[in-house]
Image: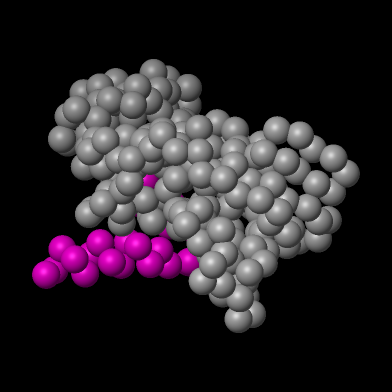
Amino acid sequence: MTRERGRVEGATAFLLHSYPYSETSLICEAFAREYGRLALLARGARRPRSGLRGVLLAFQPLELSWFGAGEVKTLAKAEWLGGMGLLTGSSLLFGYYLNELLLKLLPREDAHVALFDAYAAALAALARGATEAAELRRFEKTLLKELGYGLVLERDATGAPIEAKRRYRYQIERGPVPAESGNGLVLSGKTLLDLAADDYSDPRSLAEAKRLMRELLAHYLAGQPLLTRRVFMELQEV
């Protein structure tokens, strides 16, 4: 990868979203490992014979080059890097959920290498048929940490070690407190310790971790609805 004034060559990235711009072009929201989330104008990408039509695929690693100094850069080149299976079925919907979180929470042009690697790892695991719920929790935890909202999991709000057999209330932006005091979502100490260790083998810990992440994300989304979550709920009703 090289970078000249106003031009970037060969950046590893994923496509998060694209939408039409004029009759022949696209605006692409990409997530680049060294550059963060950025908007790219793909000129002519909607033309039937455009070489970009079969390359600009979601959930596949890409090598992108672009130029420009404004908010929307111009895509100069895109190549498919390969090496990752396609998402299908429920895994495809979970992939869109990850993309929606990045689009709504990640500021533009703010590089987060660890978050990019966590996103790539989650996609690879989903493509292999890994347990979706566990992969989502791992990614959500990394996302919150990278945005500066890291979870307090191994000690309570006073600094005392978390006890596995005790119940706690999780207070946003403060951390866990004993369940008999304060307010917040009630969780077991074991759930907090399992979350800290990325261990989701206990069904109870997995269920409580899901509720905690949902509450935290709703807080930081500040009222922005998640369309993919609504689709999950509608499918469960069918």
Image quadrant in which the C terminus is located: bottom left
Q: Main secondary structure of the magenta part?
A: helix
How many discs appear? 0
101 on left or right of 45: left
Q: Is residue 5 above or below residue 151?
A: below
The quadrant the N terminus occupies is top right
234 within the magenta span: yes
Q: Is residue 27 left or right of 99 when viewed as pictured?
A: right
Q: Residue furthest top?
A: 161
Measured as percent of width and height from the top left, residue 38 is found at 66, 54
Q: How far from the left and from the top, in percent, is residue 117?
A: 50, 32
Is 66 left, or right, of 112 in this rendering? right
* The stretch drawn in magenta includes residue 10: no
Q: Is 89 on the left or on the right of 149, as rendered? A: left
- Please name the residue shown 23% across and 38% down the image: 129
Q: Nearer the viewer, residue 164 or 201?
A: 201
Task: Name the residue located 37 percent from the left edge and 46 percent from the top edge.
Answer: 213
Above or below, 119 relative to 156: below
Identify the colour scheme used: one colour
Frontmost residue, 230 versus 16: 16
Question: In the orientation shown, which residue stands out farthest toward the left?
Answer: 238
On the question of residue 92 being in view, the answer is yes
Observer able to see residue 184 = no
Q: Residue at x 38, y 37 (%)?
A: 84
Q: Quadrant of residue 4?
A: top right
Looking at the picture, how far across and down is residue 42, in whole percent? 64, 63
Q: Residue furthest bottom?
A: 23
Residue at x 45% of width, y 45% of height: 60
Q: Nearer the viewer, residue 148 or 29?
A: 29
Residue situated in front as seen by the camera: 98 or 51: 51
Q: Residue furthest right?
A: 5
Q: Which residues are magenta?
A: 213-238
